[in-house]
Structures are given as structure tokens and as C-alpha cells.
Image (spheres, rainbow, N blue to C red):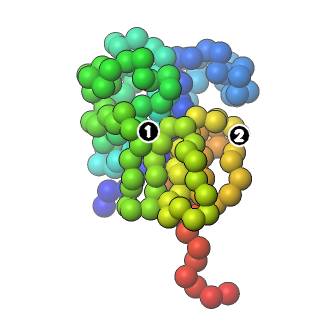
Amino acid sequence: MQKVFFISDHHFGHKPIIDFESRPFADVDEMNERMIECWNTVVGKQDKVFHLGDFSFLNQEKTKTIVSRLNGYKVLILGNHDRGRSRAWWLEVGFDEVSEHPIIYKDFFFLSHEPMYMNKHMPYVNVHGHIHSQKYAGSNYFNVSVEHWDYTPITFEQIRDAVVPSEEGE
């Protein structure tokens, strides 16, 4: 059965992010390899991954090589560092779908790169990236930046269970 995963902000090939976010890697090659390994440890070939932006700082050939090594059907929601390249560019490197806009998933989860304005009266949870190791307070936000999840995509069930109140009594 297909599993659905979420992750954002890999910044493949981006050396300064190691210092900016205190990532535990000696260099960009170690970072790239570890993140590919983390992805493929949990994502199977038939699974689906929503990548919520800021995927790669590398050229087309190197980005294509990384995408080809990652398991699953890959959907990219463009992040601020991805938008300088066209939808066609991202499809060419191997993403199966590319969206320039947020996506509503399962009628309740608002998938975007940057956190969107939410309040308690809105019927959504905003699954987002962009703010890396920071976190927004409140149950309307769920940050899937790699820094929060040990560089490993997380399942839809992990997100759902964290944000949807249990129906069971205590």
C-alpha cells in the first residue's frame, strides 16, 4: 500500500546552510549523501512524497542525479529558492508534479512552502517548511523542514496524529 510522506528545505548543494542551521555535516557532499540515505530509508519506490520547497541549489544535471536517486513519486511545491527556475526545469530534473501554489490535501491540510496566515477559526492545518529549525506555536501549523525530522521524510499519519484531536475518551 502506498504511503504518503512530507519534507522540505533540503537545500541540496547549499554549503552556507550547514552553518546557518548548524547542520551536523562536515561538508556539502556528506550532507547530500546523508539526506538521500535518510529519504530512501523510509520512502519506497511506490510511495508518494510532497516536497514543500527549497530542494536544490545545484545545476540541472546534478539536481537531476539527486532526484533520480530518491525513491517515490515526487511532488514539489516551489519554495522561495526554487522559484527562480521554471516549472518545466523542475519537471525536467525528475519531479513528477510541480506546483507554483499551495495545495489542499485531504480537505484539511494546507501544504505550502512558507507558513501561511492561519487562525483557530480556519478549518485547516498548514503543513509548511521555510522557517527551518524555528517553529510556529499553535496546532494550526506543522513544520516539515528537515531540521525537525532528522533529515527524513515523515508520514501523513505522523502529521495527522500530531494535529487532529483524538476521538477517543481518556
Image coordinates of residue 129 in percent, x first then y, are 56, 39
* Residue 85 can be seen in this image: yes
Pick the residue in front: 97 or 48: 97
Q: Nearer the viewer, residue 21 or 47?
A: 21
Say few, some or many: other residues with alpha carbon within 10 Å of mark 1 (under 14 / 14 to 19 / 20 or more). Answer: many
Dot 2: what SS?
loop
**Label 1 SS:** strand
Residue 90 drawn above or below residue 129: above
Q: Which residue is mark 1?
A: 51
The answer to whether residue 76 is visible is no
Toward the viewer: 48 or 69? 48
Amino acid found under the numbered disc labelled 1: His
Give coordinates of residue 40: x percent, y percent. Answer: 44, 40
Residue at left 61%, top 58%? 119
Q: Which callout, 2 or 1, points at the residue further toward the start of the chain?
A: 1
Quadrant containing the N terminus in the rendered view: bottom left
Look at 71% across and 53% down and name the residue there: 137
Q: Residues within 10 Å of mark 2 (few under 14, many from 20)?
A: few
- Residue 58 sits above or below residue 120 on the image: above
Q: How far apart in space, not on screen, are marks 2 and 1 (Cα)?
A: 18 Å
The residue beneath circle 2 is 134
Residue at 39%, 62% in the rendered image: 107
* Residue 136 x, y percent position in the rendering: 68, 48
For this orientation, the residue located farthest to the bottom is: 169
Split into 4 quadrants, where in the image is the C terminus?
bottom right
Q: Where residue 55 sits in the image (x, y, percent)?
A: 47, 27
Is 168 on the left-hand or right-hand side of 137? left
Left/right placement of residue 32 relative to residue 19 reads left
Q: Are marks 2 and 1 in contact (CB under 8 Å)?
A: no
- Amino acid type, mark 2: Gln
Q: Nearer the viewer, residue 42 or 6?
A: 6
Q: Quadrant of residue 15 in the image?
A: top right
